[in-house]
Image: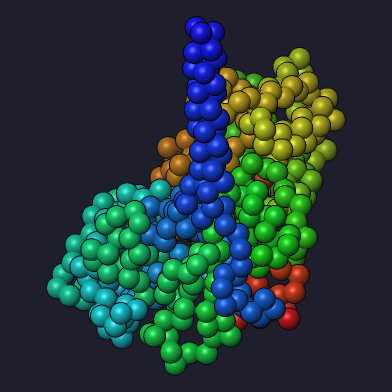
Amino acid sequence: MKRVHGTVRRLAALLMALSMMLLLAACHRDGDPITPEKNDTRKPAGVAEDTDIILPYSREEGVNPFSGTSLMNEAIMPLLYDGLYSIDEHYEPSMNLVEDITVNGTTLMLTMNANRRFSDGTVISADDVVYSYNMAKNSLYYGTLLSGISGVTAGGTTTVSFTLEKPNQFIAANLVFPVVKSGTADQKDDIPVGSGRYVYEDSDAGGVLKKSEQYKSERFKAEQIFLINIPNEETLFNSLNIETVNAAVDDISTGELRRVKAQSAPLPLNNLVYVGIRQNGNLADAAVRQALSALLDRKTLADSGMSGYAVQSDIPLNPDWFAKGDIKTQSMDYTKARDLLAESLRDQPIKVVTLSGNSFKEQIAKEVQRELVSAGVACEVEALEPAIYRSAVKSGLYDLYIGEQRLTNDMDITSVLDDKQLQSSWASVMSGTTTCETFMKGFYKQMPFLTIGFRTGVLAYSRNLKTAVKPLPGSPYDNVTEWQLG
């Protein structure tokens, strides 16, 4: 009898466990209602597959420009939100929401354009600018652009006064932060009211950008753009391959190029790539550093080291920058440079440190090593993990290192200048009291680091897009209003 009761109890326990398993399995089949949305890459309802433009974004991240972190969402922000200024391919600023500017030393006074309105029809006031500035300066993306500004105040409804940390004739190029209606961007998931060409609306599989009523008199070939929710970069480029989306941006920050079946265009980034030099060691003599600069084959470094996604340059100013003027290249004779290095660095091996896992930087380091070895200089390369690399650079545990610095739109290179005299000379350029050519004469004489060029990203887009894409700095989809599939 005891054996019968024991069997019954075991059978009941087994049935209970089986029931729980079936219940869990049913729950698993039903799924978390949030999870499918995050991974939903369906084409949105109502899309005409052959004519409607579809761009990727993260619905979870949202369209608040001050809380975004992904390149996908950063790319669509200029379509929704205008800044005080916009910049062209030469980083030259033009008035956008502004109609007048007055500069007096470190004070910049702007008068708002009375004809510009938010998408809801309300006037863009000075208070809106101050609100937007305060949001932008604490954001990941726009904070660096505004680091040279110490304060902003509203003078009435149409005048905004900026106080600068130092005189800067190029500061307007940094005033591209989104201006939104005051109080509409307080929370991460807010959809701020902006004054851009499009207005955001939710849709079944993501969102829709609809032409703003404030632009109704202008002709757009793409009057609405569909946004599809993409959970990660791997999904993004798979979606581009099968043309679920029509474009994607990649800053190639890892040095890894993705293989996609698409057309592509360079994406301007203003990222200065250079070789840093420890000047109190084997390379303390400026003539040796000048010889190193003459030795570098910058075309090979750009084409091979960075797979062509760079513009070669031997000056630390973007070759496309409107204000650099006509700077004559100064370089030591190549043969003389090789002989000088072979003599000066005899029995003094050079150590080059670079970032491991970044194929661009590792390849550049190997090219530098090859050039040195061909000149008879012993050289070793160390590829270091990110934390160790940063520590080595900070501690001076190198002779050379492969560095990269993203410059702001005003081309301020102060952060990569350790020499006080050069810092002062560059400050004079920014204040307008001297020229870039004068600065570069001092730079060549000192040669504090070796410029390789300016790295770019990539805008990949559908093979059936018949419009020429024109990405601008900070605005990859700038001419999307003209895009046509066919």
Q: Residue furthest bottom?
A: 217
In this picture, residue 327 sits left or right of residue 78 = right
Q: Could you say which is closer to the camera, residue 464 or residue 393?
A: 464
Residue 149, image x, y percentages: 30, 54
Q: What is the quadrant of the C terminus in the image?
A: bottom right
Residue at 42%, 58% (x, y): give it.
62
Which one is nearer the viewer's eye here, 253 or 205? 205
* Quadrant hosting residue 173: bottom left
Residue 286 in the image: state x and y as whole percent: 61, 32
Residue 467 can be seen, yes or no: no
Residue 320 location (% of width, % of height): 60, 63
- Tell me: residue 309, above or below residue 162: above
- Does residue 36 appear anywhere in the picture? yes
In the image shown, does 13 or 222 lie closer to the viewer?
A: 13
Residue at (41% x, 64% y) in the render: 176
State the residue at coordinates (71%, 75%). Answer: 465
Return the x and y of residue 120 as percentages of the image width and height: 30, 79
38 left or right of 260 in image: left
In the rendered image, the vertical position of residue 243 relative to residue 364, given as above or below: below
Q: Residue at x 52, y 18 (%)?
A: 8
* Residue 213 position (above or below residue 350): below
Q: Nearer the viewer, residue 272 or 209?
A: 209
